[in-house]
Image (tube, rainbow, N blue to C red):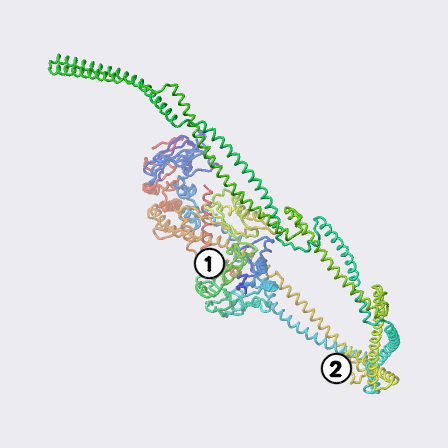
Amino acid sequence: MRIKEATVFGFGKWTDMTFHFPETGLFCLYGENEAGKSTLQQFILYVMFGLPPRKRKLFYPKRSSHFGGSITVKDERIGTFTIERTENECRCLLDNGEEREEVWLKEYLKGMNREIYEAIYAFSLHDLLEIRTMKEAELSDILFSVGLTGASQIYDVEKKLSQKIGELFKKTGTRPVINEQLQSVKQLHDEMERYRKEEATYVDMRKKEALLERELYETEQHLFTLKQTLTEKEQTLQLLPLINEYERCLQLLQTYPETIPFPEEGLERYERIKDALIPLRSEFNVFHEQKQQYEREIVELENNNYRMPIYERAKSLLERKQEAHAVKEELEKLTHEREFVQEEIASCARDIGIERTEIERSTFAYHLEHRWEEIYTDNRELHVESEKLTEEFEELREKRARLDDEKATLEALLLEEKEAEQMQQDVFSYEMAHSFLQHSAEETERIEQLVKKQKRQSNTYLLGTVVLAVISIAAGFFFEQAIAYVAAVIFLAFGIVLSHSAQRSLKELANTKRTDATPPISAEQYRLYSEQLKQHDEAKTKLEHVLSEQNEIERKIEEWKRKSSLFEQKEMDWIKRVEVDRKEYPFLQEIEPLYWRKLLDEIRNMLTLIDKEATILANITMLREKEQTFSHLLTDLANEVGLEAETMTFQEVEKIVQTSEATESKLTQLRDELDKRNRALHSLAEKINSYEKVRDELFNLAQVEDEETFYTMARKKREKEELEQKRDVLYNQLRNNFNEHQLETLLNMDFEEVTLQTDVASLKEEIKRSEALVTNINRELAALEVELKRLETSEKRSLLTMKHQLAVDNLEKLANKWATYQLAYTTLQRAKASYQEKYLNEVIEKTNHYFKHFTNGAYTNVFPPTEKQLFQVEASDNIRYTVEELSQGTIDQLYISLRLAITQVMNDRFQFPLMMDDAILHFDQKRRKQFIRFIEELAEKEQIILFTCNELIRDEFSQAHVKTIEQGMISYR
Amino acid sequence: MLAPSISFLHAADLHLDSPFSGLSHVPDAIFSEIKDSTFRAFDTLIETAIEKNVDFVLFVGDIFDEANRSVRAQIYFKDGCERLKEHGINVYLSYGNHDFVHDALDVISYPDNVYLFPDETVRFFPYYKDGRLLAHIYGFSYESRAVTENKVVQYEINDASVPFHLAMLHGSMYGNKHHSPYAPFRLNELRKCAFDYWALGHIHERNQLATNPPIIYPGNIQGRHRHETGEKGCYYVQLSKSEQTLQFIPLQSILFQDLTIDVTDSNSIYDIEKRVEQELSRFVLKTLVHVTFVSETDTILSYEETGALHDLIQVINERNTNASDWIYLYTYKIDVQEEISFQRDDLFVGEMLQTLEEIRVEEALSDLYYHPLGRQFLRQLPDETIKKDVKQLLLYELLRSKEGDS
């Protein structure tokens, strides 16, 4: 970029001022000190990069309130644009009128800032002093300026990293965090290892535990045996008297026979038998006496009692006592009943007036009811029929008489036959005549009307034809047609003809009116005759009727006669039937057949009663027979018991039965008792017998005959048993303390009390020792157990592991941090080194070139400083000089060469204007000229702005490039 | 006769008494819970077995951790087996690469309900229920740290008339790059065998490789570091000839979780605090959380630089930590996703990045990692990880300070 124009609104001492920069690229601004050169330089920097408010204050214009300004630059890529920066804003106005903000500017500047710019593109006289003392580091500094990252930033970062690295870790230190952490991890690790080893003893402890347990078991076994022996010995000592006693007992027992024959508990058993036998025997005696007493009583009673058959007969008779009584009562009842029925029959016979015997003789068939009922009804019917016949006959007779009278009357009314005929004829004739007259009057009237009509018709025709004729004439006249006249004539002729014919028919009609007739009798006669004829005809008709009625009556009479004879026949028949029955039942003679039917009911009633009586009688007969039987039985019994037959009643029979039963029951009782006694005696005898058997057995077992020797045997037996018991007690006491084997050994041994006591003492000693051992082992085991338990439940290892892990993690975290810082630091340093290496050569080469050029070949080579050495230059005579050895001018040349070289290296990337402030003040004229020529050449490629207060320098430049500042004004020379 | 059926728990990789890693610092209350967490998870397992009244429990290797095979752990495990015995529950046990047989403490004798596969030969134990032979359980134990041969071929069904055949195998699939190839197998091989259930162990991440037959890694029962996140536990399996029920049962007593928070839009440290608290409210208690702050800007780096972020995490932790109820942020990471924009034209930065790319990390860091103690206790992070951090740090430091000046 090149600055074309700078317009100051107000900045430091400048207000409302515009600087035009020449197109050539070289611009030398001359001004004395305080003329405002630096201010302008600051202004350009301000517009391009801005200023923080604090620094900005320094440049507020004294004579204007309008701070800021603008510069117009030309860029190869973008073209011409203006950057305007005031107090509060910054904007870029593009050639095409677009406006951009500061961001755009920053982007355009590619991150270039004031500091870097100043480092690279602006240098002044003061800077030239640096090169005298410049060593490697300083040169690097300058070289870093070539990169955009300022050296100081890199240093800051480097310093910061270095500090952090140092805080974190030092290879040989102990205090940095990582060193400390490493130590603590190590400690934890060691502790963990120690504990791990400790835990590893767990296995050994377990093994030891097993060993101890084995030892404990064995010792305890030994102790047990010892204690057992001790107990035995002590017991032996203690039981020595008992053993002696036992042995004495055994000796005593030797004196008794091996076995004493005596039953088990013989004495007690014998006593028990004796005790049982005594009461049994006394009881036996008592029962025996009682038995005899009962036997006597039974014999006595049996002798006094009735014999059995008598008792049984009396008893069965007595059982029928009720029956006998009933028979008697029934007999009385039936006798009464019979009397009553007989009385009733007699009453009946009286009522109908027929003897009982008569009825008993007759038989009354079943159909009699029907037959006598018929006789009754037939009689009734015959009676009615006879009355009806009589009535009918009377009626017929009356009718016939009336008809005879009527016939006579009618016959008197009749005319003579001829007379009647004549009168008939006359009447007819009259009637004929009268009817004709009436008819002709009507005809005349009709003809007259017809004539009138004909007349009207014929007139009409005539008129019509006349009219037609006139018309025809008129037509003929007008049309002069002959035919019309002819037609008129014809019409006229036709009308006349018609009229004429009508007149003729009228005449004919009038002629037909007149004809006449005459009757044979007068009208009066006619009326008389007609009346007579009428009467005659009526009478004649009635007579014919009467005659037919008469015939009818005659026929009915004949019929009646037939009926009458039939009736008589029936009547005869009925009488015959009555006769028959009366012959059969004579008692009917006196009785009207009409009442036979009723009588029959009475007879039937009586017959029933008679039957009843017969039944009763039969019952009475049967009962009487029964009564007889009882009487026989009583008599028989009386004979048996030897009583009078008369005195024998049922009361007596009862007495016999009662007495007999009482005796029998007493006997039964006695026999039962007797039986009981017999049984009791029998069982007692058996009991006694069995006891005696047992007693004999006891005697047998004891091998004795009597009671006395039995008792002696018993005593001996008891003594032996007591001895044996004592022996057993002693044995048991000994057995309580020893087992069978021990006891046997003991009994076979001879003991000395002193020896035993010595043994006991030594045993006790040994037991004490063993017990102590057990206690020790147990204690040891317990301790071991505690330790094992501790290891098993201890969280120490978990805790240590966990802590160790945390520490390791923490260490790792720190280490990672360190690693980052360390690597960053190393990277930075190496980058720096390689950067230097890369660009130093280029820069030195270019410096060499410029320096050679500026010194006009006096110096041929430039050597960059090292850590120990300053800049060196080689003269054309191959002699090297350090920078200190050079003159001020040469140093300036060297410095400018270096700066220009850097700029040139930079300008491969950026093209910013180069600003020099009295950099060549120390140059001699020759060098100055050379330098100015050089930068004039250089300015063709890039813009160079030179500030100077040296007129000589100013004058070296062609006027086109120079501006002079004088009293705040710019002027071009 | 009832159709044969069995039920069991399948667990593996208990690693009893092994510590959590990656925590560096925790409060005392949490510390003691962490210390006992593997035991608590084991307790829950035993309680589950009893509660479900299973027939037996399968422990497929790595019950203990070789370095941490403490007496306590072994006694604790034995006591657990004894509790199962009281409830008539059998235990089938095989050792894995972390608790191989030669390492075993032989003085501890297990109760008689424990059937331990004694060596590397594949054997089987019959399982009887009410006098009826219901299953053959096959397996083997590691005799040394590594078993590298394919053991699947040795799994042969002994008696086909036995209703169920279960196989216990502690190993990894061929081609698993993240784990040592112990007792390697191919899924197809397992599928081909006529086993009713493949109880696998060794891989700590739960994984059901197949369902018919079930081939299952139950994972470990308690997560112990950042990479063992989420629920951990065992499988509750019910098998009959017609049906299989597989149920995962969480056992862990402490949960590891990852949390990623995008703080690009957070304008202040308080914003971040709010975000973190909001996210934490979704977690259950007793969770150890690793937070990654993701951002597209480097603001978060300045919070880290000033220590504000560190303080914030501490404040949140103090707030969320009571005696027994806690959610703890044990570590955090910053991931600035977009590279800090730097001037490509900046020659030095370019040079620096180039240098960083080429630098030999091991050499640069040898001071610490070759330090006698460092060598013993430290493991260097992968070069790439460190370089990434360094790049971020340097760019931030160099360019930030520059911006700060303008």
Residue A959 coordinates in the image, percent (x, y): 32, 35
As drawn, the label of residue B362 is: 1
Report if residue B61 is visible in the image: no
Quadrant hosting residue A326? bottom right
- In the figure, is residue B56 to the left or right of A961? right
Contact, mark 2 vs mark 1 (Cβ under 8 Å): no
Report if residue B300 is visible in the image: yes
Residue B162 coordinates in the image, percent (x, y): 51, 68
- Viewport quadrant of the N terminus of chain B: bottom right
In this rendering, is residue A751 above or below A206?
below
As drawn, the label of residue A647 is: none
In space, the residues marked 2 and 1 are separated at their CA atoms by: 91 Å
Q: Residue at x 71, y 58 (%)?
A: A615
In this rendering, is residue B212 above or below A547?
below
Quadrant hosting residue A548? top left
Residue behind mark 2: A741
- In the figure, is residue A972 to the left or right of A260? left
Type of amino acid under label 1: Glu
